[in-house]
């Protein structure tokens, strides 16, 4: 089995890590870098609990090898807050009760952030389409959609 | 779940990738987006001693029209296909297809070439590429060769690609005027494989008869294949509901789905018939036939 010295930027900080070829990105984040906000849910590419942004795009980090992320920029839920201030999407999930148990929340918020980075005025259908790879088993999706709509409104005002 | 051990290689060119594949033979697998391969490895349904990652090779991601073909680079991600202006405006059947593959997050990694090269009859591009009569371009130690899509799928998870070949491009003949296509899929939930799905591509002539027809089904047997009898039922016929119904009936008759949690054989065959008819009607509509 090969090992690899890789460099990647996580939440703005550059890291050099030695990884086994088979190490998954989610394990690199959680175990090597201790960023446990990225959750492991189904571990089979269905649920989206492990969603992170890879070069700005949401991906399921249980289905990416760490070595494939060499040279890339990763954003995890820990990277959303800036200078002690929650990201508008985080604020909106709080305000609109977009979560209950919180397990899917990091993935939901990151997918929401990626959508709003592309389009600050998505329709409800576009929001639902965007989060269709992220499963919530508690609240249902209504408040999550409302939270993303509310964040969109906030972002449009800035 | 942790994949079994393997050596990982990230060649910087197609030539380097082919050299690695030639050296390792059957013990190597090409990894593109990895959205099918990594789950298989994690579930230990597959193994590979060597993974050759073509993700670092520049120049394999593009969608452009050239020389009478729509050319899609083998490593083009499904998300890029969805956002491609030419796909959105001129090849709605490809947009139909890309949009129902897995989910949006998976489509940020999954590639069109991978969807075909995996040889999975449950994947969505095979039926669409059969309907469009696509040509697969492969590069190997002896250079480039083209494989008509009808000869590409050779068995369950098996394709005409040799162990030392890489799928570098998909060429779709640009259809003439008065052409249209559609892909319709029935799935239990976003991200599921098709309970049934149908691809239809038609070209009408001036008199309103079917001049060219391509029909294929997803998950309708161990090997993706064209519904030839259904196509033959339409060639030279005037566009009408009875002709379309007969073609859909023939397509379903030729299907051999297997029973699973998605439904019984009878249900899947019936859904294949319904979807084939609807896909044909939509294709005709898009061709300007109605």
Image (cartoon, rainbow, N blue to C red):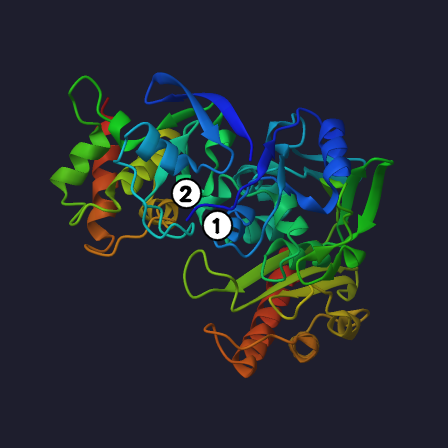
Q: Is residue A146 visible?
A: yes
- Mark 2, residue position: A62
Q: Chain of mark 1?
A: B
Residue A127, above or below B57: below
Tell whether label 2 touches label 1 (CB within 8 Å): yes
Residue in the foreground of this view, choosing between B248 and B153? B153
Residue A51, above or below B286: above
Q: Is residue A119 visible?
A: no
- In the rendered image, the quadrant that contains the C terminus of chain B is bottom right
In the visual, does A66 lie left or right of B231?
Answer: left
- Mark 1, residue position: B42
Residue B219, above or below A90: below
**Residue positioned 55% across, 62% down in the render:** B184
Q: Position of residue B108 (x, y in %)?
A: 49, 39
User: Which residue sits furthest bottom?
Assistant: B266
In the visual, does B232 lie left or right of A153?
Answer: right
Could you tell me how many numbered marks the image carries?
Answer: 2
């Amino acid at each position: 089995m090969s090992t690899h010295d890789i460099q990647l930027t996580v939440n703005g900080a550059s890291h050099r890590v030695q990884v086994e070829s088979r190490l998954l990105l989610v394990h690199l984040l959680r175990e090597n870098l201790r960023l446990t906000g990225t959750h492991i849910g189904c571990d089979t590419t269905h649920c989206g609990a492990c969603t992170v942004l890879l070069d700005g795009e949401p991906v399921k980090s249980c289905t990416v090898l760490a070595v494939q992320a060499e040279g890339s920029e990763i954003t995890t839920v820990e990277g959303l807050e800036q200078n002690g201030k929650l990201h508008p999407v985080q604020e909106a999930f709080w305000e609109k009760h977009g979560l209950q148990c919180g397990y899917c929340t990091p993935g939901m918020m990151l997918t929401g952030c990626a959508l709003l980075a592309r389009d600050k005025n998505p329709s409800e259908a576009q929001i639902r389409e965007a989060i269709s790879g992220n499963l919530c088993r508690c609240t249902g999706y209504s408040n999550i959609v409302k939270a993303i709509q509310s964040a969109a409104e906030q972002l449009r005002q800035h | 779940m942790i994949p079994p051990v393997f050596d990982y290689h990230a060649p910087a060119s197609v030539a380097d990738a082919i050299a690695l594949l030639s050296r390792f033979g059957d013990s190597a697998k090409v990894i593109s987006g990895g959205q099918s391969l990594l789950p298989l490895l994690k579930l230990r349904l597959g193994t590979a001693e060597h993974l050759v990652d073509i993700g670092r090779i520049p120049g394999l991601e593009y969608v452009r029209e050239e020389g009478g073909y729509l050319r899609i680079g083998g490593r083009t991600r499904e998300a890029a296909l969805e956002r491609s202006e030419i796909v959105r405006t001129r090849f709605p059947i490809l947009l139909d297809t890309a949009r129902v593959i897995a989910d949006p997050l998976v489509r940020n990694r999954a590639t069109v070439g991978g969807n075909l090269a995996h040889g999975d009859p449950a994947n969505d591009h095979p039926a669409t590429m059969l309907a469009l009569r696509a040509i697969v371009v492969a590069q190997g130690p002896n250079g480039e060769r083209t494989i008509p899509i009808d000869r590409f799928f050779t068995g369950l998870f098996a394709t005409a690609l040799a162990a030392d070949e890489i799928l570098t491009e998909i060429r779709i003949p640009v259809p003439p005027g008065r052409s249209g296509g559609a892909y319709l899929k029935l799935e239990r939930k976003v991200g599921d494989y098709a309970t049934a799905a149908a691809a239809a591509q038609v070209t009408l002539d001036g008199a309103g008869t079917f001049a060219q027809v391509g029909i294929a089904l997803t998950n309708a047997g161990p090997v993706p294949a064209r519904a030839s009898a259904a196509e033959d039922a339409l060639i030279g016929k005037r566009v009408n509901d009875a002709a379309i119904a007969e073609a859909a009936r023939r397509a379903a008759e030729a299907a051999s789905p297997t029973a699973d949690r998605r439904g019984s054989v009878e249900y899947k065959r019936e859904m294949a018939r319904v979807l084939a008819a609807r896909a044909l009607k939509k294709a005709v509509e898009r061709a300007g036939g109605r």
